[in-house]
Image (spheres, grey):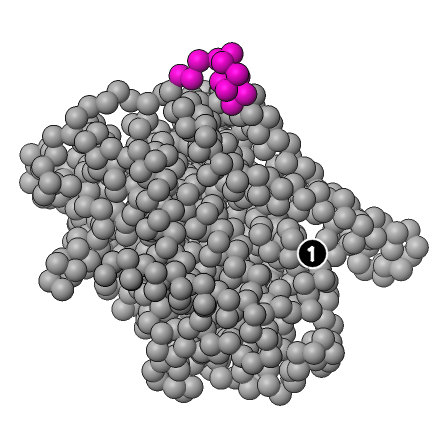
Amino acid sequence: MRQFFYIIRLLLRELADENAYARHLAVHKAEHSAEEWRRFSDARLKAKYSRAKCC
Amino acid sequence: MRRVFWIACAALSAWSLGYIATERGEPVNSIWLVTAAVCTYLIGYRFYAGWVAAKVMMLNDQRATPAERLRNGHDFEPTNKWILFGHHFAAIAGPGPLVGPTLAAQFGYLPGTLWIIIGAVLGGAVQDFIILFCSIRRDGKSLGAMARQEIGRTGGLIALVTVFLIMIILLAVVGLVVVNALKDSPWGTFTIAATMPIAIVMGVYLRYLRPGKVLECSAIGFVLILLSVFAGEWISRSAYAPWFTWSGPVLAISVILYGFAASALPVWLLLAPRDYLSTFVKLGVVFLLAVGILVAHPQLELPAFTRFVDGNGPIFGGKIFPFCFITIACGAISGFHALISSGTTPKMISSEAHAWPVGYGSMLLESFVAIMAMVAACSLQPGVFFAINSPAGVVGATPAAATATISSWGYPVTTADMDTLARDVGEKNLFYRTGGAPSLALGMAHIFSRSGGGRSIIGFWYHFAIMFEALFILTIIDAGTRVGRFMLQDLLGQMWTPLGRTSWMPGVLISSAAVVGAWGYFLYQGVLDPLGGINTLWPLFGIANQLLAAVALCVATTILVKMHRARYMWITCVPLAWLVLVCFVAGYQKIFSESPNIGFLAQADQLTTALSNGVVPAAKVAATQTQIFNARLDAVVCGVFLILVAAILVDSTRVWLRILRGHRTAELGEAPFVMTHLRPEEI
């Protein structure tokens, strides 16, 4: 059960791009800041919304 | 023990399918549909998909995926299979599997249910699975890129143009669903209007106040949206109600203006926060509906077959074959899924073996969503179902005329029934609410209220369901318009470079206006259509979506042939042949049928004759001329779809035959084999 809720939490974080942000910080060896989030978010959203959403 | 389980599962599947297929007279409980679907999915997943994975695709978990080889911490990242399963499901789940089955319930519960189950197991899930596998083997390439690489430049170009045209029709039809759901509904309109400032507040919160806290921000947004549903009831009873009571054309213009603004605004301000919110609400409601159906297990009030199997249905014209199979697209097989299976997912998969649960399994879950929508729609009294979904042009312009017509079909309903129902859910009127969303919301509200809270809160559940549907439909409109703009700018940029720059504001505005103008035109004509618009637009969308699936299956078959798996090519060729048959028959009938209820040209001819005979009142001459033009335009659009797909089909067949006859070498565009170095815990 604990494993199930752990997966659910990770799924929600993935859908919310929070995992992707954590990976971004790790790859760029950067600290979290408002500026860093905006940099990450702009690039992420630009890629995300250049693809069609499903019907 | 395992063998006993699968034998029991197969027996239960056969028994449930047999029961729902043969039971007549007595109402059938929805649990039979759920059992038939779940057991068939389990058998299909374990045995058919397992066989395809082992024998046809020969999934190799020793082979490094693009997520490992090209890992960059952004797009390419090995991800846990269950997280990716949820991610992929959230990406493929849209309004299609909810609205399509609701509309197809016009034929009764049986045809649609069988198509959803069989179509998904043998067609839709196979398509998603194979396209995902092909994209994994090609570094996460898109469907268009794979078509270009494996079939030829023509195939790639056709895939691109088909996607663009489908998007235009898709945006128009989902816009129409929202307009018809919110027409003359101050409660619904207020709730949906409130999502815009809520999304902007979320956007500012996420950008400046608590950057990066998306889950926290979405939780706040969800609470605000729930409050707006409650506030909507107060608004609908207050003096402010007229401010939010909008007619169809006004709503259509608002949606068009909104689409234009959302396409040109910074994405973080409106689109992204609402997309986060709609994803969570969507997953939550799907889960809630599954629980609700298990708890309430409503009886199916619609019969297995209605009298409209003869093709004279009030919601859309045409017989079960081919129209049931294009009306239900996303719940059984959807070309759009091929875009997702060749989009983000192949870049995140950590082992080839995961393509089985992620590609095949997610589609089965999507199909189950369609089964739940079918249950929700069929749990309504048939008279109520047809009163909500039938346009005034078919059943009569007054409630009394509508109830008389519908009762004469053998589905009794009274104006008093409909008034009581409308009052219960906080609406003025539930007649002529075509598009599927209101009847689906009503079915869901019945299920939710029977599962807890009782009839006293059915109004809340109805508007919660409307909010849920409209929320992610509007997200599709924002995102789709933006994607359409990028595609158009790509094309225009080849004629004049500045128009291709996504940062050049005049280019952004011109291309946004062109895309919004294109889908807005179809939306507006749908709103003005006396037959409700859905009769025209949904079949066009269904044909287009299924034709895109045909394109995806052509690509998949070509790759199988090149992989020397020609003896297994029937796994893609059987659904491909079925889709080509269905789409071409449906397309032919939509263009050339002599019945004005079905054929666009017959409809145009009928109106032309009425005009020349002077039957049309002077005040309606201009509108009738527009209708004639629109019917001919729809015929042209439908014809273009068929020509495009015939071209890719011919091109693909030529490639298959040349390879099979040995005239062409089977050059596969696969990335070279690299052994995986991921540790089991990383997978």
- Residue B21: x percent and y percent? 55, 67
Label 1, residues with CA under 10 Å away: few <14, some 14-19, many ≥20: many
- Decide which of B18, B172 is in the foreground and name it: B18
Is residue A6 depicted above or below B236 in this figure? above
The answer, for residue B640, to whether it is visible in the render is yes
Image quadrant in which the N terminus of chain B is located: bottom left
Magenta span includes B665: yes
Q: Say which quarter of the image contains residue B283.
A: bottom left
Is residue B648 depicted above or below B348 in this figure? above
Magenta span includes B505: no
Q: Chain of mark 1?
A: B
Residue at 67% over, 63% down:
B309
B34 relative to B576 in the view: left or right: left
Instruction: Find the magenta span and give its range.
Output: B656-667
Q: Residue furthest right?
A: B613
The answer, for residue B529, to whether it is visible in the render is no
Residue at 9% over, 43% down:
B681
Question: What amino acid type is highlighted by mark number 1?
Answer: Gly
What kind of element bears circle 1?
loop
Is residue B302 depicted above or below B620 in this figure? below
Residue at 21% over, 35% down:
B61
Image quadrant in which the C terminus of chain B is located: top left
> Circle 1 sits on which residue?
B318
- Residue B162: x percent and y percent? 54, 35
- Residue B652: x percent and y percent? 53, 25
B590 relative to B372 in the view: left or right: right
